[in-house]
Image: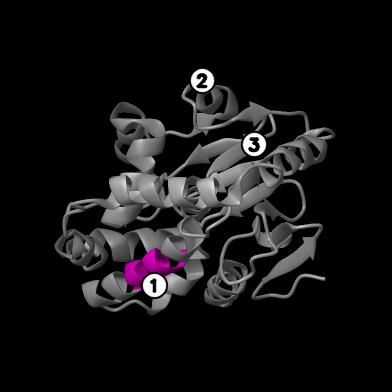
Amino acid sequence: MSTPDGQVHLRIEDGIASVVFDRPEARNAMTWAMYESLVRICEQLRDDASVRVVRFRGAGGQAFVAGTDIAQFQDFRSGEDGVAYERRIDGCMALLESLPMPTVAVLEGWAIGGGLAIATACDFRLATPGTRLGVPIARTLGNCLSMANMARLVAALGRPRAERVLLLAELITAEEALAAGYLLEIAPPDAIAAASDKLCGRLAGLAPVTQRVSKQALNRLLHAGLPEGEDLIRACYGSADFREGVAAFVGKRPPAWSGR
């Protein structure tokens, strides 16, 4: 049963680890407690040589993860809070991305903000037809991504689509994501579990050392020479627009952006 702070569950069976984000009443929006659980799970899986594949899925069938719980941002007082937050998220995503075994994200419904970041840090993604993906922060919250998450997004979607997602706050359909190569497959809701089982079984039957070193090589290429970006994070989270975005979201009203 889900709790108000949400839970992240882990089950390992026949070499396949299944991780479930369990807060369906809030579209599995991530709380600090859920991020901490995800870190602990990734640390456990990293050191478990018996695990050949890790699958991530959201509970309830309506969302993978609909971002970070925005109510938590009400406690932020300066740009330094934003820097600390993005460092925390970067640490979690780096752990997930660097897992030595292949990872699969099963997307149903919404994969937004932090949810898209989690999915993009995985190696493969499957989705149901109604899935929507995006980072609509230019419309909702007025914050920004870290350089590491930006690099993953551009590598996965290409710069033109990343610009649409970030600057126009557009959501991408599953069909477009499949055409872009972001998704490996689209399956109906009643077939997505079987499709993920088939993919996980296929991955589990291949050479784990080759998979591990290939992942490491790809990640080194992605992050080689990654520029510093904390000045950008500090400016964004320290802005009046960010404070307005949080207040408007919590108050269920449209934000009034000032550019300050």
Q: Quadrant of residue 245?
A: bottom left
Q: Residue at x 61, y 74 (%)?
A: 44
User: Residue 146: x percent and y percent?
Assistant: 30, 57
Q: Residues within 10 Å of mark 2 (few under 14, many from 20)?
A: few
Asked if the magenta segment contains residue 201, the reply would be no
Q: Quadrant of residue 202?
A: top right
Q: Along the line of sight, which residue is nearer the eye, 73 or 218?
A: 218
- Please indicate whether residue 132 sits to the left or right of residue 233 in the image: right
Q: Residues within 10 Å of mark 1 (few under 14, many from 20)?
A: some
Instruction: Give SS at disc 1.
Output: helix
Q: Give how far apart the Cα atoms at labels 1 and 3 are.
A: 27 Å
Q: Which residues are magenta?
A: 85-92
User: Where is mark 3, residue-wise?
Assistant: 126
User: Where is mark 2, residue-wise?
Assistant: 179
Labelled disc at residue 160: none
Please tell me which of labels 1 and 2 falls first in the chain: 1
User: Where is mark 1, residue-wise?
Assistant: 88
User: Residue 164: x percent and y percent?
Assistant: 34, 31
Instruction: Give SS at disc 3.
Output: strand
Please tell me which of labels 3 and 2 falls first in the chain: 3
